[in-house]
Amino acid sequence: MRREREAANGELADAEAARWRLRQREGLDEAGREELAAWLDASGERRRAYAAHARVDALLSGLSGEQRRRLAVPAPTRTRRHALAACAVLLLACTLGWQWRASQPQWTQTLASARGQQLERTLADGSRLSLDADTVVEVAYFKDRRETKLLRGQAMFAVARDAGRPFRVSAGQVRVTVLGTRFAVRNLYGAVEVAVEHGKVAVADHGGAEAAAGASGEARSKLLLSDGQRALWRDGSLRPEAAVPPETVAAWREGRLEFSDRPLAEVLAEFERYGPTSLRLARPDLGALRLSGSFASHDAAAFARILPRALPVALRRSGGETLIDARK
């Protein structure tokens, strides 16, 4: 008796859900929408029946006119209704399976360079990727897009054009989107920098590393960059930087480190990415001194000789290290 009552309630909810879907297609006013909400709130059986009809409607909306005509049959009996429901479930399962497969990458690769090492790699689509020292990049190619995550370090991208699969680079909260161009991305010390050698890229601040990687939600701010233009994200803000000659983008490829008003502590950390320098700050506050200049990335000794002429500091040896201290 209980099973019969549950079956009857289920059939009633199914019939009412069908009528509600029909009313929705014809258009509901505010009172009608409130009545539907109250009907749905009354029981879980109603919500399940309504959701089932909504899924079937969504599937049927994707059918061609000929496919719809084939399904235009007289009102189904209870047995036929169960059969149609089973077919709808099978169709839904196939659709979900296709969507799941489409969400899986067709090709993946993780690239990593060691301290002091630089790498050159050609990706599956012919795009070329140059990694600076101590850099980690994850690459995943999907049917409709190419995704790359710059987890740490800096890299130069020469992207093979493919209008059907945009190339995207995520670095921290920043996302870079291109079709075909050459550009550099840097993700170090809590900041992300993008510089374009040739072409155009869209740079967006998505407000979170996960959002940048998944492209979910609207970007908080956007910039469009072309040859020689740069953008910097730091402290939650994306802003344009002064343009540079395009040939100087990613100077690290030529063994040069370019600094523009950078803290000394960050400059020293940058040199350490290419090898041990034995340079240490005698006092933490000296790390806030700002420095600009161009230096050989693998010649920390030459940098040390220049440093006292560029900043009010002096060098002294201590226990096998060179301490950078305030000038007296």
Image (cartoon, rainbow, N blue to C red):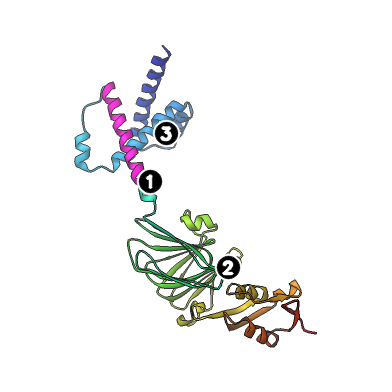
Q: Position of residue 284 (x, y in %)?
A: 74, 71
Q: Secondary structure at mark 1?
A: helix
What's the residue type where badge 2 is placed?
A: Leu
Q: Nearer the viewer, residue 302 or 248?
A: 302
Of labels 3 and 2, the one closer to you = 2
Instruction: Give the image quarter of residue 116.
Output: bottom right
What's the residue type where badge 1 is placed?
A: Trp
The residue wearing badge 3 is 32
How would you rate the neighbour count of disc 3 (Cα within 10 Å): few for under 14, some for 14-19, many for 20 or more?
A: some
Q: Taking 236 as reference, is 250 left or right?
A: left
The residue wearing badge 2 is 188
Residue shown at the point (41%, 37%) measured from the top left? 29
Instruction: Give the image quarter of residue 275.
Output: bottom right
* Residues marked 3 and 1 touching at CB (< 8 Å): no
Q: Position of residue 235 (x, y in %)?
A: 61, 65
Residue shown at the point (45%, 72%) measured from the top left? 183
Q: Secondary structure at mark 3?
A: helix
